[in-house]
Amino acid sequence: MEHQQEETSNIPHVLIFPLPLQSTINSMLQLAELLCLAGLKVTFLNTNHNQQRLLRHSNVQSRFEQYPSFRFLTISDGLPEDHPRSVEQFGDIISSLQTVAEPFLKEMLSDVVEEPVTCVIPDGLFYYAVDIGNEKGVPVITFDTISPSCLWVYLCLPKLIEAGILPFKGNELDALVTHIPPMEGLLRRRDLPHFCHLDDYKTDLNSQAVFKEIERIPKAHGLILNSFEDLDGSFLSCIRSSFPKTYAIGPLHFHLETRFAAKPTSLLSSSNSLWEEDHTSIKWLDAQSMGSVIYVSFGSLAVVSRKEILEFWHGLMNSKVKFLWVMRPNMLKGVESHDQFMKELVEGCKGTGYIVSWAPQKIVLAHPSVGGFLTHSGWNSTLESVTEGKPMICWPQYVDQRVTSRLVNEFWNIGWT
Ligand code: UDP
């Protein structure tokens, strides 16, 4: 008995701490599940707000029941319940969460807790977790959930500043960017994250977080990325030239699918969604012919104007190509007569298009009726599309999406932007 207890206490206990975003919760839950399958103890730290949504709309509760060594832990994000938590306030969300997470992590990593944490895997933007881990003597492995190519761009930013190239002056958005091998001759100024274009980038909350993140990476025990050598080998080698302990462990969703392929309940039916998935979209796809549908989704964060939606809607209707389109309830800029506007779009496309507020995306992309993906180039969406071999049309917005979409078009030749 004593021997058994000793054995359990020797099992590594990993604390996973994702950004409070759908995409990061997705990839970090996939990692958590793979670690549970490898026999490790895992604590998944989520915000109260997202945990409620996750439990309401996904099947994580029943799925993770099979792993007795797994548990969820929740903390407040420090914001009032009615806060919109939209992408425009991302900087505020992150700094509010920091005020709660810092003391929480300090306590979690102290040796007074019952089941001491032996390793922390935080999102790269939670740079302070690296400091806390080092102070408490607990190894921290940073998980950067953005694309490796964009992380490499971030790592090159200090060189661009030193060379007086950043912040970009003037409006030459098509000018090529130097100092970022192996993307020289490929990346244009317009492909870099938005804060590279701000005169006062130093005071921008997002850019501050990025600069702190890249400062901390060398202080972490390792860096993990959701990608694989065949896709991102050249960028991974660049990153490894500075941080040899960089591990490409993706595509995580694909590794899990492979683990479960032989089981009757495939991972495709598992969901980590913060919105209710509309499975009527699959019935609609079943009725379409092979490769005939374009799937349209701009992810979980993008906010789009009425004018932009109408432009896409008319373009799709005029193309006469069948489409399945995800329009989240909080996707439209401004709230005025949202319901009426959506109703008109849904009614107006009957026969050609099908609009849902959230789809089971992995099942959609694997569906034989889907021939292509009109995407915002979020990193998870890109990986999911790549593994299903679906070509992409890209309409990037934030963070790593512009770099990724440029590579989709010019480097990997698997789509257009
Ligand atoms: N997603 C989904 N259903 C949808 C739209 C998106 O399940 O209707 C999932 C998608 O599979 C992906 C994640 O949400 O895993 C979006 O992450 P991504 O990195 O592509 O973009 P972000 O939401 O961060 O902009």
Image: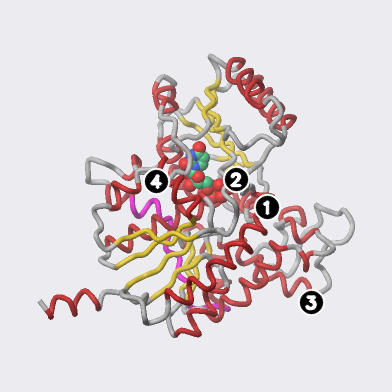
Nearest to N terminus: mark 3 or mark 2: 2
The residue tagged 4 is: 55
Nearest to N terminus: mark 4 or mark 3: 4
Q: Residues within 10 Å of mark 2 (few under 14, many from 20)?
A: few
- Disc on res. 89: 1
Indicate yes or no whether the magenta region holds residue 250.
yes
Measured in 3D between alpha carbons, the distance from the residue under mark 1 to the one under mark 2, in whole angstroms, is 14 Å
Seen in the image, is 135 located left or right of residue 114?
right
Query: Which residue does the image show at 50% across and 70% down from the upper left?
Result: 142
Q: Nearer the viewer, residue 413 or 70?
A: 70
Tell me if label 3 and label 1 are in contact, CB under 8 Å: no
**Does any portion of residue 409 appear in the rendered image?**
no
**Does any portion of residue 307 appear in the rendered image?**
yes
Seen in the image, is 306 located left or right of residue 275?
right
- Rendering coords of residue 388 (x, y %): 43, 42
| Magenta part of the chain | 242-256
- Rendering coords of residue 336 (x, y %): 71, 28
Q: Nearer the viewer, residue 98 or 211?
A: 98
- Rendering coords of residue 83 (x, y %): 62, 48
What secondary structure is found at the residue carrying circle 1? helix
Q: Report the amino acid beneath label 3.
A: Glu
Seen in the image, is 186 located left or right of residue 375?
right
- Rendering coords of residue 417 (x, y %): 66, 43
The residue tagged 3 is: 162
Measured in 3D between alpha carbons, the distance from the residue under mark 4 to the one under mark 3, in whole angstroms, is 47 Å
The residue tagged 2 is: 82
What secondary structure is found at the residue carrying circle 2? loop
Comparing marks 1 and 2, which lies closer to the viewer? 2
Query: Which residue does the image show at 45% across and 55% down from the upper left?
Result: 27
